[in-house]
Image (cartoon, rainbow, N blue to C red):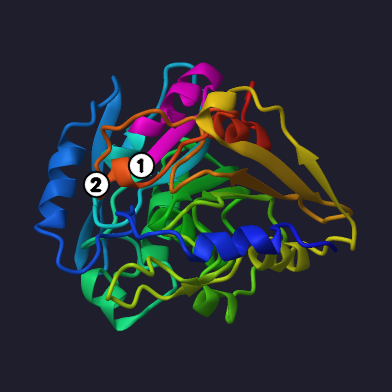
Amino acid sequence: MRKLIPSLLLAALACMPAAAQQDGPPAGARDPQGAARSAAARVPIPDGAVLRTIRVGSLERSFWFVRPASAKAPAPVVFVLHGGNVSDGRVTFRYGFHELGARDGVITVHPSGHGQGWNDGRETPFLLARGGADDVAFFRAMIDQLVAEGAVDPKRIFVTGGSNGGMMTHRLVCDLSDRIAGAAPFVAWMPAQLAARCEPRRPLPILLMGGTADRMMPIAGGQVAPMSRDDRGKVMSAEDSFNFWRTRNRCGDQVTRQDLPDTDPADGTRVSVTRAQGCAAPVELYVVDGGGHRLPGDGSRTYGDQGMAGSGVSSRDIDGKAVIWEFLQLTGR
């Protein structure tokens, strides 16, 4: 298999300056958690969204539940995970997955992390100190409750998320493959420490999406948020993450690569998609050349999950949420 990312591009990325990011601020930032909470509070709550709580061990956890009028019980559900340095699921309303859910009769759940994010398997002392809850148990408890209520179809449970939430999505595929039907982590490659122990019970459809100019999540792999003095762990490269899931999904040796149309030349990005062939479940990798730590098609600057303005370019060549929705085969459900 030929390299997905040209070596000259990787060398250029290594020289790029630091910037603020979604998984948490550089050490020394002034009250970043307070700023993130303030930004979360400004995100509008859609009609019909209900904040629910559930007891998991000694902790009371919460999640926003959106069941559209078009949903027929039991309905498909998509869990949408926020990034780090914030623990309020309402911030993910900005992506608009709930709007697609209203169109197609799909429930969306927007859970809140604990502390300052998700325990996504990197498990460095710094990350455990800022969170460290049993988040796998949290997701299993939410799924069990929603299925028991008859709201959710146990065979149509999907997960997506970005940054820290994207790495948590990887972890849920590893640890809850018995409950999940498909996943789409974005701006988040496979945590190296998690990969060493990840053994899903079955192949699942998985889509990966990220940018070459993402200063937080290096496309060549390595230290997460290298501009920070805190140990946020390491991730595999985009190519190695793709190959990791190709192996787990028992794919063949062949891949296909397609350059997508440059529908907005002014944004300075180009998007390609690489698809594994001969798989027990599909694996796709979207690479946004010039894209930053942003979901493609996300034009909002109001999120504030630690400095969206410093998170680089959001490609306008594709609508990331629509691509994810289509991959998970939720359109027209």
> Distance between the Cα atoms at labels 1 and 2?
8 Å
Residue 179 lies, in percent from the top left, at: 57, 55
Q: Return the residue nearer the eye: 88 or 11.
A: 11
Where does the magenta region start and end? 94-109
Above/below status of 304 relative to 198? above
Name the residue at 27% across, 75% down: 229
Residue 53 lies, in percent from the top left, at: 23, 48
Residue 198 lies, in percent from the top left, at: 60, 74
Mark 1 or mark 2: whose residue is earlier in sequence: 2
Q: Return the residue nearer the eye: 83 or 266.
A: 266
The quadrant holding residue 58 is bottom left
Q: Which residue in the structure is indicated by mark 1? A: 110
Specify whether 314 is left or right of 53. Answer: right
Above/below status of 55 relative to 88? below
Please, what is the dominant secondary structure of the magenta stretch? helix
Q: Quadrant of the N terminus?
A: bottom right
